[in-house]
Image (cartoon, rainbow, N blue to C red):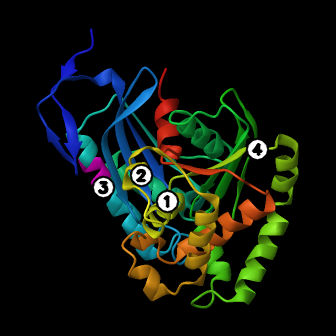
Amino acid sequence: MVKKQPIKSCSNGLCIKNKFVFMKNRFAALDLGTNTFHLLIAEVIDGKIHPVIEEQRHVKLGEGGINKGFIADEAYRRGIEALRYFKSVLDKCPVAAIKASGTAALRSAENGPAFIKEVKEKTGIDIEVIEGKLEAELIYRGIKAATDLKSSTLIMDIGGGSVEFIFCNNDQIFWKQSYPIGAARLMAAFHHSDPISKEDITALESHLSTMLAELKEKAAQFKPEKLIGSAGAFESFALLETETFNKDPFLLQSDNYKYDLGQLKTVLDRIIASNHEQRAANKLIIPVRTDMIVVASILTAFIIEMLSVQNVAMCRYSLKEGLLMSLIV
């Protein structure tokens, strides 16, 4: 028999001892991305994820070094401090198992192994650096837990270091790939003026055309009926569309949101034309995305145009939920 533990309902790292749960159903996932470190503690019951704690720290691990192959000193420090904080949360809310995965920044950084070793020494957390295709598969598993993929679908996940694309339906992944074109990389390489210049946009789009030639071929093969953007910048796009066009805020309460294509294009165009001060003053754009959302918008608009996408949606589930589902035996 599994012993019940008197811990539940955790918020901001504090646990309220007012409910018993079976520990065997509670898991923790740490998604250690290039921009943001995520901690999700949740109970998984009958294939459904019931969050207990959701925490994030905008560490910007790729700042100053993403295109140079190392983690800069300040970013390194922010990453260590974030994981020490996550460990304090985990100490208050015990779980049956923990899965911590590092993605693009830790994949490519020369000092990534040193970072992983220091995290282990200071927190006891074991970080597994996962390859891009496994990251894509886990993103699929996460979105599948919240979304009906009944028709041929293209999932797109914009990270700071990489972008994952998955052609799929409910039954299988047809094709998946990870590309080193994350928002932090693109911003460092192409966003040289504010607002971004037409010359920078042209250079960025030319780069994307070269990098994503195979994606275009696969889209012609699998003919996706829908594009689903997972979390991140796509959440900001949904917030901006809702406010800009006076839509019912209730639409944002679900884990899934369907865009109006014309309205989404307007939102993307306005972001691309904006300057830093305008974006920083917009309460719907979180600080870590203030500048990176520009290249994320150009990338999203490019994909919609290149693949002639007519239906676009957002799902709040992504890698961290896929990590949780991977822990279920």
User: Is residue 66 in view?
Assistant: no
Name the residue: 18% across, 23% down.
20
**Snapshot quadrant of residue 195:** bottom right
User: Is residue 21 in view?
Assistant: yes
Residue at numbered disc 3:
84
**Snapshot quadrant of residue 75:** bottom left
Residue at numbered disc 2:
252
The disc, 2 or 3, on the residue closer to the chain's N-terminal end is 3
Name the residue: 61% across, 91% down.
193
In this picture, residue 216 sits left or right of residue 81: right
**Between marks 3 and 1, how big is the CA–CA gap?**
32 Å
State if disc 1 and disc 2 touch (CB < 8 Å).
Answer: yes
State if disc 1 and disc 3 touch (CB < 8 Å).
Answer: no
Element marked by disc 1: helix
Q: Nearer the viewer, mark 3 or mark 4?
A: 4
Within-10-Å neighbours for mark 1: few <14, some 14–19, many 20+: many
The disc, 3 or 4, on the residue closer to the chain's N-terminal end is 3
The disc, 3 or 1, on the residue closer to the chain's N-terminal end is 3
Q: Which residues are magenta?
A: 84-88
Residue at numbered disc 4:
224
Whether 267 is drawn above or below 132: the answer is: below
Disc 3 marks which amino acid? Arg
Element marked by disc 3: helix
Element marked by disc 4: loop
Disc 2 marks which amino acid? Leu
